[in-house]
Image (cartoon, rainbow, N blue to C red):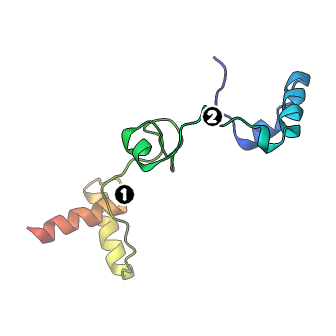
Amino acid sequence: MPKTKLTLAEAKARPLSAAAKARLAKLAAKPDAEIDFSDQPEVTDEAIASGRVRVVGRGGKRAGAGRTALGKTRKTVKLSPAAVRRLEAYARRHKLPHFSAAIEAASELLGK
């Protein structure tokens, strides 16, 4: 099965065929006024709302691409070295996957 995803460096390193070079040269020589945009839908709020036009943000064109929301909030907290040691020990004792899981577990204990 052929590889479909390339890094930028891989794409730049690939040699172009003579036909591809000719096609690119022809496109580059074409003035912007000659480009036909008639087959592209008009981007309006209604078109976006109806789904005829999709504004692609972070994640790519493929539906479901990119990171999914975890439903968590990122916070920066300054802790004393002793508190960090206690939370790390708690995570090891309870076989928690990471430090933030120990903090979540501790916050649940406080909420009871």
Q: Residue at x 36, y 74 (%)?
A: 84
The residue positioned 40% from the left and 45% from the top of the image is: 46
Residue behind mark 1? 98
**In the rendered view, does 23 fall on the left or right side of 54?**
right
Q: Position of residue 104 (x, y in %)?
A: 25, 63
Q: Residue at x 8, y 67 (%)?
A: 112
Residue 75, relative to residue 70: is it above or below? below
Local SS, label 1: loop
Q: Nearer the viewer, mark 2 or mark 1?
A: 2
| Kind of residue at badge 1 | His
The image position of residue 85, as x and y in percent, is 35, 73
Along the viewing direction, whichever of 78 and 19 lies nearer the viewer: 19
Q: Earlier in the sequence, mark 2 or mark 1?
A: 2
Q: Quadrant of residue 7?
A: top right
The spot of residue 82 in percent (x, y) is 34, 80
* Mark-to-mark CA distance, 2 and 1: 54 Å
**Quick one: quadrant of the N terminus?**
top right
Task: State the image coordinates of residue 73 (x, y, percent, origin top left).
Answer: 33, 64
Q: Is residue 76 left or right of residue 3?
A: left
Residue 16, label in figure: none
**Which residue is denoted by mark 2 in the rendering?**
38
Decide: is 59 above or below 13. Answer: below
Q: Is residue 34 left or right of residue 81?
A: right
